[in-house]
Amino acid sequence: MLRWTLIFLVIAIIAGVLGFAGVAGAAAGIAKILFYVFVVLLIVSLLAGVIRGGVK
């Protein structure tokens, strides 16, 4: 999932440099949403690991 975030971020940067503001905004928005989903899943995973007893 983090890979898709980085892909959309690169698309947003390239589109912004080339002057495609609509595409850049959409790609940046998608990258931001995917990043937040990734962070939430990371936190849930860490909490589940702590609750289950951690790494042995």
Image (spheres, rainbow, N blue to C red):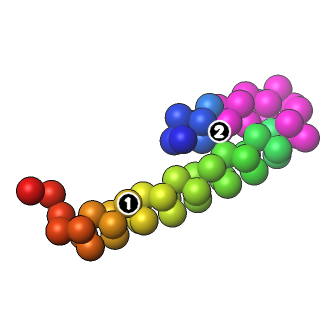
Type of amino acid at the residue the image marks with label 1: Ser
Separation of residues labelled 2 and 1 (CA atoms)? 24 Å
Q: Which mark is residue 24?
A: none
Near mark 1 (Cα within 10 A), the count class, few <14, some 14-19 or many ≥20, is few
Q: Which mark is residue 45?
A: 1
Residue 13 shows in the view: no
* Residue beneath disc 2: 9
Q: Could you tell me which residue is drawn at 62 percent across and 31 percent down?
A: 7
Secondary element at image label 2: helix
Near mark 2 (Cα within 10 A), the count class, few <14, some 14-19 or many ≥20, is some
Residue 40 is left or right of residue 8, and the answer is: left
Going from N to C along the chain, the mark reached first, 2 or 1, is 2
Above or below, 56 against 1 in this view is below
Most extreme residue toward the left is: 56
Secondary element at image label 1: helix
Residue 56 is left or right of residue 5, and the answer is: left
Image quarter for residue 33? bottom right
Residue 41 place in picture, x, y as percent: 48, 58
Image quarter for residue 14? top right
Q: Nearest to the eye among marks 2 and 1: give it.
A: 1
Q: Could you tell me which residue is drawn at 42 percent across and 65 percent down?
A: 44
Q: Which residues are magenta?
A: 8-23
Q: Is residue 20 magenta?
A: yes
Q: Is residue 4 magenta?
A: no
The C terminus lies in quadrant: bottom left
Image quarter for residue 53? bottom left
Residue 31 is left or right of residue 2, and the answer is: right
